[in-house]
Image (cartoon, rainbow, N blue to C red):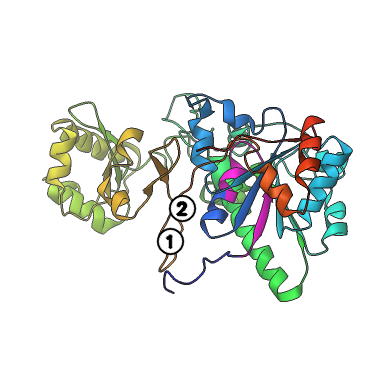
Amino acid sequence: MTIKDPPALDGIKILDLSRHLPGPLATMFLADMGAEVIKLEDTVTGDPLRSIPPLIDGVSAMFLAINRSKRSVSMDLKKPKGRELALELMATCDVVVEGFRPGVMKNLGLAYEDLKAVKKDIILCSITGYGQSGPDSQMPGHDINYCARTGILARSGAAGLPPQICGAQVADVAGGTWPAVSAIIAALFQKLRTGSGQWIDIALADAACSTMALNLGPVLAGKQLPPKGQGPLDGGLPSYGIYATKDGKYLAVGALEGKFFRALCKALDLEDLQDQGMSTGQQGQKVRRALEEKFLSMSREQCMARLEGVDCCVEPVLDLDQVPSHPQFLARGMFIPSDGALAYQMASPIKMAGRISTATRAPNLGEHTLEILHDMGMAHDDIHAMASEGIVMLGKKKP
């Protein structure tokens, strides 16, 4: 494929009613693949993420980071005319994404059956905390709650310490965004083959549970799990863990395979330990202490210099402000110039041959209401009359 070829999702139109993180990040990645994404927001505050600090020119930096390449239309779905407009807009779309609690779309008159009545092959992707069914379907929640439900928190942090909040939104992104992206693409493929639409039910708790597949394996087999911090991938092995350096910084060692641990030990002049990477118990602690002492005798820079060119799976633990300038991410084009308040945007991690990542800024609330309603065939005066009644909101265009 060459750059002259249309993007993979060219011609696909998505209406995004979701808010906060999982849905908007999913639709941004779909926009990166060529889909036209219209973000439908209420007429008062819009997506609540817009107002969460830190703010840049009055808009959240977090909102700006996950809503690029979209247009914003602002409607009051609780008003009959607003609902009518929404259904008319949905009839022009291939996919609708929403993140309300189960039942809200039905109360708005926008249930899957209502959408099918205006477009029989519509794809609806519903992203909720606990799913459309089950005793907890109506419970509210956020990432920390889903991580608690699925054992992620219980296994996070060092041995002997309380559960630790994860540094990334595991449930929202791994549990919501990527399942939604893959399910929508699968539903579009099914629609291409069969002509049928689909209602996709994504539960953040369900998908977060799937991130614990390795930990759950022994549990499902009826085996006893080692205590937190003593498992093979959470600190129980000397070949897989976090080590401090002399300057108070840290290294992440992932030398699980024998060849990597042998290379590490050779580079550190610890050849007598080179076959002890998988040791547990007292012997494992002995090996770990030897590694700790060696790393603590050098700064992180000295450690990495000593390990340069050595295949041993060791990485410096970077602070977030060091990530965008990392040479590998620069070479991969993971941070690209933006024409908005953010100087750079994180690019999509999906690399497709022959395509160059680009980024347009996130929209103002209701910035494209006028042009979208014009595209639907509505007269200028009628649109302004609806705006005066609070049915729609005409946002300001950015220069």
- For this rendering, which residue is in front, 330 or 59? 59
Q: Which residue is mark 1?
A: 351
Magenta-colored span: 11-27
Report the side of 293 relative to 100 (left or right): left
Label pair 2/1, CB-CB below 8 angstroms: yes
Could you give the CA–CA distance between mark 2 and mark 1, rounded to whole angstroms? 7 Å
- For label 1, count other residues whose C-alpha is less than 10 Å away and answer few (under 14), some (14-19) or many (20+): some
Question: What type is the residue that disc 2 sits on?
Answer: Ser
Q: Which residue is mark 2?
A: 348
- For this rendering, which residue is in front, 323 or 55? 55
Task: Give the image location of residue 310, x and y in percent.
Answer: 17, 54
Residue found 20% across the figure and 36% down from its top: 290
Any part of residue 223 in sight: no
Residue found 75% across the figure and 74% down from its top: 194
* Image label count: 2
Task: Give the image location of residue 325, x and y in percent.
Answer: 28, 42
Give the image quarter of residue 300.
top left
Question: What type is the residue that disc 1 sits on?
Answer: Lys
Give the image quarter of residue 118.
bottom right
